[in-house]
């Protein structure tokens, strides 16, 4: 998870606090990270279920009243995919499944339709013709299931969006997570996608924005000129507060990175004019803070 995604989560928690949604700052932040974990575990579980459906298909066709030879000889190679079973048998994934319970979001008809699309594809037909289990090809077919069959299905994407509100914000990141899982299945910590360093950044940024709210707003308000602070979009003010906090209190983050990040977030999450607005205010604040010697950044060049 990169810092941009963390900034989004902190922004969302601050918005919830401003909206008087019940919960402590840390509990709300943890819930946001839980959403990320849940979505990731579900996507991996969904890939597994599509692969394992080969056995269901085989059993159903064999149990017809008058099965023909094709019904009795359905290839179930994909159900024994070595990457799938390496994951299913791992203690890490078992624990994740126990906590997340991804089966609660699995829709049988969706899985069946995805498998039928898979089985009709040339990629799948080529895969099952191979008698041996080449590890590279085991990975490639899972990438195909995820990238082409699942993400290429409008129904599947709509289903994911309906059940996971964070898909819109985190879809691109999730694609990276899943592809990394397929490439290096044994290296994934399903219960901790953030890591200690990034979690510290998240909690520090959130707590600083809360603790320094009055100070940051006192820095922001003189720069608003003809703007009424009470009429500024809530998200814009939150982003300005976060930007000021990073400029002043996070000495390892370059000022240019901070300003550009919050301009981009304003463009994406607020009004049409918010990017320009946040840019102007943060740039003005930055120049003043530098002039007053209040920004002291640590350089890591050459280290």
Image (cartoon, helix red, strand yellow):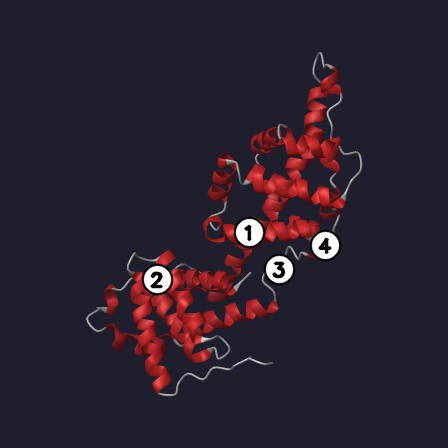
Q: Which mark is residue 174?
A: 1
Q: CA distance from mark 1 to mark 4?
A: 17 Å
Q: Quadrant of the N terminus?
A: bottom right
Which residue: 37% across, 66% down?
A: 239
**Looking at the image, do the residues carrying marks 2 and 4 touch, with CB atoms under 8 Å apart?**
no
Where 124 sits versus 222, above or below?
A: above
Q: Earlier in the sequence, mark 1 or mark 4?
A: 1
**Which residue position holds label 4?**
186
Quarter where residue 82 is shown? top right
Q: Is residue 29 above or below residue 155?
A: below
Would you say the residues marked 3 and 2 are in contact, meaning their CB atoms lie under 8 Å apart?
no
The x, y position of residue 93, in whole percent, is: 69, 51
- Look at discs 1 and 3 and give the one toward the viewer: 1
Residue at 37% x, 84% y is: 290
Give the mark nearest the N terminus, 2 or 1.
1
Disc 1 secondary structure class:
helix
**Which of the two labelled residues, at mark 1 and mark 3, occupies the earlier sequence position?**
1
- Residue in the picture at 69% in, 23% down: 60
Quarter of the picture holding the C terminus: bottom right
Label 3 to label 2: alpha-carbon separation: 28 Å
Mark earlier in primary sequence (3, 2): 3
Q: Is residue 207 visible?
A: yes
- Residue 278 screen position, x and y as percent: 32, 67
**Viewer-nearest of discs 2 and 4:** 4
Q: CA distance from mark 2 to mark 4?
A: 39 Å
Query: Badge 3: how crowded within 10 Å, few (<14), some, or many (20+)?
Result: some
Q: Describe the element under mark 3 as helix, strand or loop.
A: loop
Mark 1 in CB contact with mark 3 (< 8 angstroms): no
Residue behind mark 2: 235
How many neighbours does mark 4 have within 10 angstroms: few (below 14), some (14-19), or many (20 or more)? some
Q: Residue at x 55, y 56 (%)?
A: 34
- Residue picked out by circle 3: 192
């Amino acid at each position: 998870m990169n810092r941009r995604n963390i900034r989004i989560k902190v922004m969302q928690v601050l918005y919830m606090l401003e909206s008087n949604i019940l919960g402590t700052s840390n509990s709300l932040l943890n819930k946001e990270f839980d959403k990320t974990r849940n979505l990731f575990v579900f996507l991996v579980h969904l890939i597994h279920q599509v692969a394992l459906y080969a056995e269901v298909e085989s059993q159903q066709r064999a149990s017809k009243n008058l099965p023909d030879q094709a019904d009795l000889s359905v290839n179930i190679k994909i159900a024994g995919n070595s990457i799938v079973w390496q994951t299913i048998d791992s203690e890490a994934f078992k624990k994740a499944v126990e906590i997340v319970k991804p089966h609660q979001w699995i829709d049988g008809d969706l899985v069946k339709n995805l498998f039928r699309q898979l089985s009709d594809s040339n990629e799948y037909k080529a895969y099952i013709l191979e008698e041996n289990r080449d590890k590279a090809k085991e990975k490639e077919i899972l990438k195909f299931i995820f990238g082409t069959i699942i993400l290429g299905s409008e129904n599947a994407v709509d289903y994911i969006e309906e059940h996971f509100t964070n898909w819109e914000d985190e879809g691109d990141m999730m694609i990276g997570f899943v592809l990394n899982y397929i490439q290096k299945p044994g290296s994934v910590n399903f219960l901790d996608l953030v890591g200690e360093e990034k979690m510290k950044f998240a909690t520090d940024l959130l707590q600083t924005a809360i603790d320094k709210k009055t100070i940051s707003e006192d820095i922001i308000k003189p720069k608003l000129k003809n703007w009424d602070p009470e009429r500024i979009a809530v998200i814009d003010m939150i982003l300005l507060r976060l930007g000021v906090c990073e400029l002043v209190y996070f000495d390892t983050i370059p000022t240019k990175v901070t300003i550009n990040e919050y301009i981009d977030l304003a463009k994406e999450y607020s009004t049409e004019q918010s990017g320009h607005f946040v840019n102007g205010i943060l740039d003005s604040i930055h120049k003043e803070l530098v002039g007053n010697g209040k920004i002291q950044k640590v350089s890591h060049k050459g280290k």
